Image (tube, helix red, strand yellow):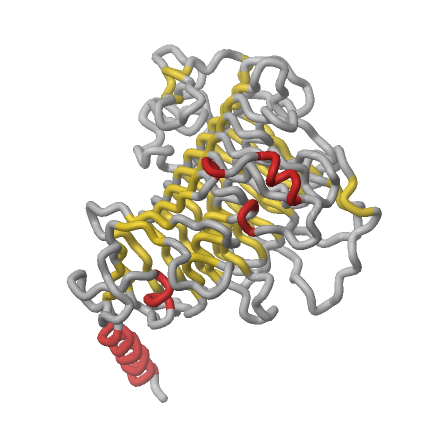
């Protein structure tokens, strides 16, 4: 077959997929007995759409609360298992001007993704934290079988149940709000090519027994070793995620971080929790040759605001190849006294252009068994000598209006802030947390906002 014929076949294949792609509709007024092909004939449940989508399809989701109604198990409000393709992703999006809300209760997840080439956009997932009393979640620790009521994750890219050759990959979570889930906010386990951007993630992890966080990746499973960022966490507002229930493996409080990249290496070192203040087990389980491949790829954490979380603002634990750039963290560690931004047992981590403001008595960073850490051009208001860069600034960043609720807070920089124009252009992003162009002055600003 010559090149011209091959190109024609490829184009024809793409066109065929495009012609077959459909728009599906789900609304609070719909019915699963409808055909789902228009807003007037929409399905009622997200699971009905999940059972029929094909590559290239778009699921348009309208006003309404989406619950466990019609589900015959306690797994998820919607379990996405049908994959798109590289040229035909499946998109789940809110209908413009409408506000669909997934409301998981007594289940393991709001949205569970066990498929690839998926976009989740403009959807809110709101859990039941308001209706849970802490004493009942603590009491559940004594039960051998955990109650999903206290462990519900918001959006969960779950690869553990997938065969080693079909782990989920290429998933984008965009413009979503995930809040008040008893378990983790947005979580990925055993997957690759995972993006979380422009999301609001708050008040999660309060009642779970597994030590979750606002945004977490765990045990990245490499789909390939192509260059570029495989994990991207950017332009998110993350606050007040914290654990009030002990992590079952150590019997004490742990985690509740804003953003955590967790365990990409697979050596046999002693396992601890992310701050290395409690041992999980004496030795790691032996790793078989056909198990999780070594992570050789790169991750980006950029332009996020992470504040008032129970654990750290941002950190990496037993993780390699990460760029932590232009983030703003404020008064984290409120439950477990973790530092603002720090690597632990990690390799090849760049931490630059960030602003870190510890709570009174808190700490900027820590350094435990790390190698190849690049730290410079960061700003923090209290002296520290754990990790110091030649161009660090110790000063008040002069925020407009810090507040415990990031929907009211304003972490932009006031005129005269030492963070303005003083960052480095090396590895700096070309936008800020709002999507505005960076830089606007003689150099990029430090932190998540470009003034």
* Residue furthest out toward the left: 40
- Residue nearest the observer in this picture, 437 or 33: 33
- Residue nearest the observer in this picture, 271 or 327: 271
Q: Which residue is depicted at the point 76% across and 61% down?
A: 287
Q: Is residue 238 left or right of residue 252?
A: left
Q: Which residue is depicted at the point 50% across and 23% down?
A: 330
Residue 312 on image: x %, y %: 59, 31
- Residue nearest the observer in this picture, 289 or 312: 312
Q: Note whether residue 114 is visible.
A: yes
* Residue furthest out toward the right: 282
Q: Quadrant of the N terminus?
A: bottom left
- Dividing the picture into quarters, in which one does residue 272 lie? top right
Residue 322 on image: x %, y %: 57, 43
Q: How many marks?
A: 0
Q: Quadrant of the C terminus?
A: top left
Residue 98 on image: x %, y %: 22, 47
- Dividing the picture into quarters, in which one does residue 84 lie? bottom left
Q: Which residue is depicted at the point 32% across and 60% down?
A: 91
Q: Which residue is depicted at the point 40% across and 27% down?
A: 406
Residue 227 on image: x %, y %: 51, 56
The answer to whether residue 332 is above or below residue 292 is above
Q: Note whether residue 426 is visible.
A: no
The answer to whether residue 116 is above or below residue 335 is below
The answer to whether residue 175 is above or below residue 157 is above
- Residue nearest the observer in this picture, 205 or 142: 142
């Amino acid at each position: 077959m010559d090149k011209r014929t091959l190109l024609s076949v490829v184009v024809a294949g793409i066109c065929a997929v495009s012609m077959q792609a459909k728009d599906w509709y789900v609304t609070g007024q719909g019915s699963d007995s409808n055909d789902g092909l228009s807003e007037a004939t929409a399905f009622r449940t997200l699971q009905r759409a999940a059972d029929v989508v094909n590559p290239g399809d778009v699921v348009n989701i309208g006003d309404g609360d989406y619950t466990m109604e019609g589900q015959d198990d306690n797994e998820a409000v919607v379990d996405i298992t049908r994959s798109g393709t590289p040229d035909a992703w499946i998109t789940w999006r809110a209908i413009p001007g409408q506000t669909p809300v997934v409301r998981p209760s007594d289940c393991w997840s709001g949205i569970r993704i066990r498929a690839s080439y998926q976009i989740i956009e403009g959807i809110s997932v709101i859990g039941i934290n308001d209706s849970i009393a802490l004493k009942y979640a603590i009491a559940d620790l004594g039960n051998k079988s955990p109650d999903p009521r206290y462990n519900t994750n918001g959006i969960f890219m779950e690869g553990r149940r997938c065969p080693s050759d079909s782990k989920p990959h290429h998933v984008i979570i965009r413009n979503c709000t995930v809040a008040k889930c008893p378990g983790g906010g947005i979580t990925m386990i055993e997957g690759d090519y995972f993006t979380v951007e422009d999301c609001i993630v708050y008040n999660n992890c309060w009642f779970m027994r597994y030590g979750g966080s606002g945004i977490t990746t765990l045990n990245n499973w490499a789909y390939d070793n192509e260059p570029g960022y495989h994990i991207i966490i950017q332009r998110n507002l993350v606050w007040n995620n914290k654990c009030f229930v002990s992590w079952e493996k150590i019997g004490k409080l742990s985690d509740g971080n804003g953003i955590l990249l967790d365990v990409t290496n697979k050596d046999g070192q002693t396992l601890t929790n992310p701050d290395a203040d409690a041992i999980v087990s004496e030795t790691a389980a032996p790793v078989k040759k056909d198990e999780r491949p070594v992570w050789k790829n790169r991750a980006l954490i950029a332009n996020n605001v992470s504040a008032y979380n129970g654990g750290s603002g941002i950190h990496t634990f037993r993780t390699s190849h990460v760029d932590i750039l232009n983030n703003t963290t404020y008064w984290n560690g409120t439950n477990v006294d973790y530092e603002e931004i720090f690597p632990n047992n990690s390799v090849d981590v760049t931490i630059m252009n960030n602003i870190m403001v510890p709570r009174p008595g808190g700490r900027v960073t820590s350094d435990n068994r790390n190698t190849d850490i690049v730290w410079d051009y960061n700003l923090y208001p209290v002296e520290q000598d754990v990790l110091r860069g030649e161009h660090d600034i110790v000063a008040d960043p002069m925020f407009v209006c810090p507040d415990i609720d990031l929907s009211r807070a304003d972490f932009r920089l006031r005129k005269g802030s030492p963070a303005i124009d003083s960052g480095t252009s090396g590895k700096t992003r070309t936008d800020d947390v709002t999507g505005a162009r960076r830089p606007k002055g003689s150099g990029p600003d430090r932190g998540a906002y470009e003034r």
